[in-house]
Image (spheres, helix red, strand yellow):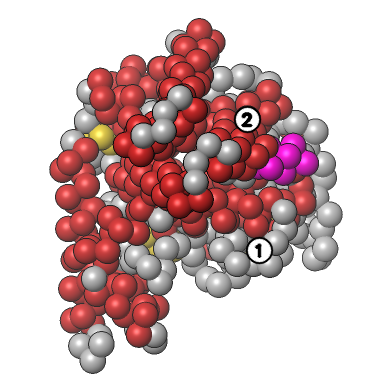
Amino acid sequence: MGKGGENIPKPKFLGKRCDALGRKITLQEVKTHRTPEDAWMVHNNKVYDVSNWHDHPGGHVIFTHAGDDFTDIFAAFHPSDALRHLENFYIGELAESSIDLKPEKQKNFEKAYRELRSKLIVSGMFKSNKMYYAYKCLSNLMIWAFGCLCVLKSDSFSVHMFGAFLLALFWQQCGWLSHDFLHHQVFKNRTYGDYAGVFWGNVCQGFSVGWWKNKHNTHHAVPNLHESCPDAHDGDPDIDTMPVLAWSLKMASTASSTKLGQFFVKYQSILYFPILLIARISWLMQSFTYAFGLGEGIWESKGSEDARRNFPLKNAERLGLLVHYLWLGSLIFGNMSLFRGLAFFLASQTMCGFMLALVFGLGHNGMSTYDASDRPDFWKLQVTTTRNVTSNMFVDWFCGGLQYQVDHHLFPSVPRHNLPKVHSLVSSFCKENDVEYYEAGMIKGTVEVLVHLKKISEEFVREFPAM
């Protein structure tokens, strides 16, 4: 998933391939093949074996639906012409007994939301307005320019700190721009989108595009899911925040064996905002070690090694990161004393981390979590694990389109400027089909995140009273 249709190679099967192509296969049998080395999946009642396809262009996201149905997540990530590549992996048909197990109401629901996707395509909701994105890019570069001028044209500490704040805003907005380009919302040619992502992500923001795509694509496929078993790749890396933050009692229970883990879980609602302050610094370190292969597994999500090896722009993103630190280092230490430069660096990094992570947290934290083996259908999974933020002029700018997180998760390739229209259709569809669709204001949503963290802490203390 992720690069659909672009020179997709046949996988190199290392295990024994199913020796009865075209046979009837039950869903129960499919569910026994859940790991990258043994991965079967269902698309429109056809069964495919993608075992050991570690060179998949989109990364290990392909294995997030091993042992499950991937019909709708495939559509969300790929252009329609990618369907022909599935023929390479076909091994059989889903048995009628498994198809009949699905209630008629559920079949009608799935048919209806697939029809809604088709209507959005016909109505042009997936087409971008290039002038809109030119404006967003130029306006963001102006924030960067004003931030730099605060350093270059003044010796005042307060002016320098204001410049640090502007750079923090610039980096936050770079996150939303690179997000849009890398989701291929802007260009149909995915190479153009990837190079634009390298500019806004690596050069401007200091984040590795390869690192981000590997984690983010997986997150989109399995939001708020706990992996089904240690060897599976069906867990959401974005909620893998232990031992610092626990979003469910299942996560919190893993902290019971260490004093440090116990401390963080017990006081996580108090520590939440301080943790947000250092989020960007953590992501910078993860990006650099990922891009240059220095991490040796530290902080890396599953499939990182294969994703790094297969990412086509790895040299460009390494150069981009070096350029980022060159311009930032020259700006700071070429114009300030060591002490003030360090203060500027820490202020800009912590303010950006807070603003980025605050928006990220609103999207999913405190919403439903599931075990991957018990996940609901695609639509219900995306909707029930996601929170929208009530739109207004400030929210629309500050959140960069992620205020429509539910709608974005359902249709990740829809350009940001079309999300308000999609939001109206999606919310109406959910009401018609009795699917809970949640939205809250920015302040209320943040309070809900804190209340949820406190609730998990209290459950943890009750479950492990000796702690």
Is 319 inside the magenta-drawn segment?
Answer: yes
Q: Using the image, determine if residue 60 lies above or below residue 119.
A: below
Q: What residue type is labelled 2?
A: Phe
Query: Residue 369: x and y, percent?
Result: 34, 58
Q: Name the residue under label 1.
A: 295
Q: Residue furthest top?
A: 131
| Residue in view at x 52 percent, y 12 percent | 134
Bounds of the magenta span? Answer: 315-322
Query: Residue 285: x and y, percent?
Result: 57, 56
Q: Using the image, determine if residue 77 lies above or below residue 40.
A: above
Residue 180 relative to residue 305: left or right: left
Circle number at residue 199: 2
Query: Residue 2: x and y, percent?
Result: 63, 38
For residue 438, what is the image quadrant?
Answer: top left
- Asked if disc 2 and disc 1 are in contact, CB closer than 8 Å, the reply is no
Q: Which amino acid does label 1 sit on?
A: Gly
